[in-house]
Amino acid sequence: MGDAIANGRPTPPWKQSSVPNPRGRSDALDSRVGDGIHVRLLWHPTDGHVSLAVADSKTGERFDLPVRDGDGALDVFEHPFA
């Protein structure tokens, strides 16, 4: 995935969309950063599902995790390994 450019400067990976979202836009409900790992809790209003977007600024790796129905979104977001 190429670097996005905003205001003439590359956008940090944790501010870029980690995976193209075929379901449309998403809204960040919360975010946290620790040791170079940025975790965002995202709500997808088109279908109401919630996911986590995780980006590691040290390695450049990033991925999305869907929050399953019945799992507490904040519990998943606050989990120390998320």
Image (spheres, helix red, strand yellow):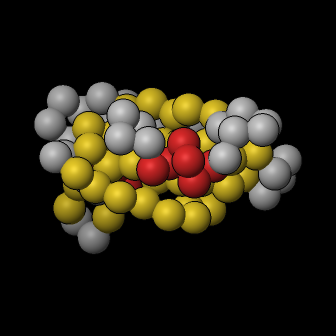
Quarter location, residue 33: bottom left
The image quadrant that residue 54 belongs to is top left
Residue 43 percent across, percent down from the top left = 67, 55
Query: For this rendering, which residue is in front, 42 or 46?
Result: 42
Residue at horizontal 78 percent and vertical 38 percent from the top: 70
Position of the N terminus by quadrant:
top left
Say if 25 sits above or below 21 in the image: below
> Residue 26, relative to residue 50: is it above or below?
below
Q: Residue 65: x percent and y percent?
A: 56, 32
Which residue appears at 69% of the width and 39% of the height? 71
Task: Classify residue 38 as left or right of residue 25.
Answer: left
Q: Is residue 25 visible in this depiction of the protein?
A: no
- In the image, 49: left or right of 28? right
Asked if residue 67 shows in the view, the reply is yes
Extreme right residue here?
A: 47
Farthest residue, direction bottom: 7
Residue shown at 41%/37% (left/top)? 82
The residue closer to the viewer here, 38 or 18, is: 38
Residue at 63% from the left image edge and 49% from the top image edge: 73
**Picture coordinates of residue 17, whole percent (x, y):** 47, 46
User: Closest to the observer: 80 or 49?
Assistant: 80
- In the image, residue 12 lies at what x, y percent? 26, 53
Total numbered badges shown on the rendered structure = 0
